[in-house]
């Protein structure tokens, strides 16, 4: 308390806060102060400390590009097409299983079309041809080749009229013929191989009852001057047979007759001449059996001729 009449004395208060504490306690931004400022700043008013800048503790991510509409559309189209293709394939498999498809082409069918100029003559017409079980009562036969004709175009000179009319729309290609005789030289048989350009489906239809459909359509005979077939002509034809195998584009024909040149008034198809109980010369001689069974033997020869190239083609 000051004495009366004495002048008042001002007392300067010492700071109660250490300078270090002033760092942690920022001064107010406005208002009077009772003492000098401590820390950074000039004398007079206290300055506000700069705001704290936080330190980044994570890596800044790469900016994500904006999704493009075109790419999304392309992906969608591919997905739709993929689903469509898969669905179509499954539908095809289902239809194939539900409905039987067309049979495939037999092995060697295409190769057989060119046998007439690719195969040796001894392959198509062997010099000696065994025929086990080819005669009446399954008796054996052996035929020997005595005449071979050059290959010829399809014409009435080498084909019966009905057969020629049936084959021309199918692409009748070429006709090969040879005449054989049996071991006793008492009978002769002319064999014909007619090559066509037909497809497998048509060939299967062609072979169904061919002889019956053509009726009395007897194939021409091939005589051989200076052989036992020298007198084998139109009037000596005794029995015949035609066959179109379903697996080869070929028609095999055969017509038989007596080697002695006897005339036959009514040639008979082989199935009729083979009827049990017949006693005429044609039936007794077995010429019907020979005409029919020799066609079967030649079908086997043709299949054998095309088997090697067909296997090699499949192996490739």
Image (tube, rainbow, N blue to C red):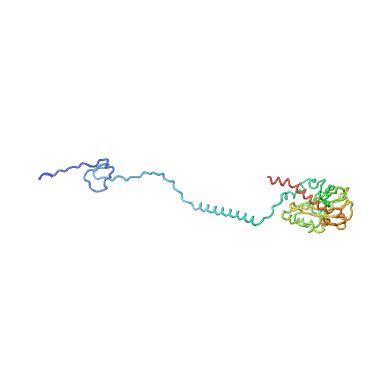
User: In which quadrant of the rendered image does the N terminus lie?
Assistant: top left
Compared across the picture, whether 57 is left or right of 251 comes to left
Q: Residue 282 sits in which quadrant?
A: bottom right
Measured as percent of width and height from the top left, residue 239 is found at 84, 55
Instruction: Pick whichever, 296 or 66, lies toward us.
Output: 296
Where residue 226 appears, as percent x and y from the top left, is 88, 48
The spot of residue 190 in percent (x, y) is 83, 51
Q: Quadrant of the C terminus?
A: top right
Q: Residue pushed farthest left? A: 5
Judge by depth and name the residue closer to the eye, 316 or 281.
Answer: 281
Q: Viewer-proximal residue, 10 or 227?
A: 227
Front residue of 285/75: it is: 285
State the image coordinates of residue 50 (x, y, percent, origin top left).
31, 45
- Please give left or right for residue 310 compared with residue 54 in the image: right
Q: Is residue 2 left or right of residue 42?
A: left
How many numbered callouts?
0
């Amino acid at each position: 308390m000051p004495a009366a009449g004495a002048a008042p004395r001002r007392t300067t208060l010492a700071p109660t806060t250490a300078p270090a504490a002033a760092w942690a306690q920022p001064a107010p931004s406005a208002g009077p102060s009772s003492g000098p400022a401590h820390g950074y700043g000039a004398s007079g008013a206290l300055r506000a400390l700069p705001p704290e800048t936080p330190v980044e503790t994570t890596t800044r991510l790469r900016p994500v590009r904006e999704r493009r509409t075109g790419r999304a559309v392309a992906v969608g189209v591919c997905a739709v097409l993929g689903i469509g293709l898969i669905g179509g394939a499954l539908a095809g498999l289902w239809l194939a299983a539900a409905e039987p498809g067309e049979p495939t082409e037999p092995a060697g069918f295409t190769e057989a079309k060119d046998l007439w100029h690719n195969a040796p003559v001894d392959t198509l017409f062997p010099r000696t041809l065994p025929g086990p079980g080819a005669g009446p009562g399954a008796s054996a036969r052996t035929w020997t080749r005595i005449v071979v004709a050059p290959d010829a175009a399809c014409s009435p000179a080498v084909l019966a009229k009905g057969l020629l009319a049936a084959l021309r729309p199918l692409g009748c290609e070429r006709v090969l013929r040879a005449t054989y005789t049996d071991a006793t030289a008492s009978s002769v048989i002319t064999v014909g191989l007619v090559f066509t350009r037909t497809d497998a489906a048509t060939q299967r239809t062609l072979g169904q009852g061919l002889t019956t459909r053509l009726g009395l359509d007897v194939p021409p005979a091939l005589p051989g001057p200076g052989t036992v077939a020298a007198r084998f002509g139109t009037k000596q034809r005794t029995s015949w047979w035609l066959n179109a195998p379903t697996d080869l584009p070929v028609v095999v024909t055969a017509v038989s007759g007596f080697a002695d040149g006897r005339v036959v008034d009514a040639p008979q198809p082989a199935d009729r001449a083979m009827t049990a109980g017949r006693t005429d010369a044609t039936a007794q001689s077995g010429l019907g059996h020979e005409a029919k069974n020799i066609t079967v033997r030649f079908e086997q020869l043709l299949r054998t001729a095309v088997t090697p190239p067909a296997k090699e083609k499949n192996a490739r």
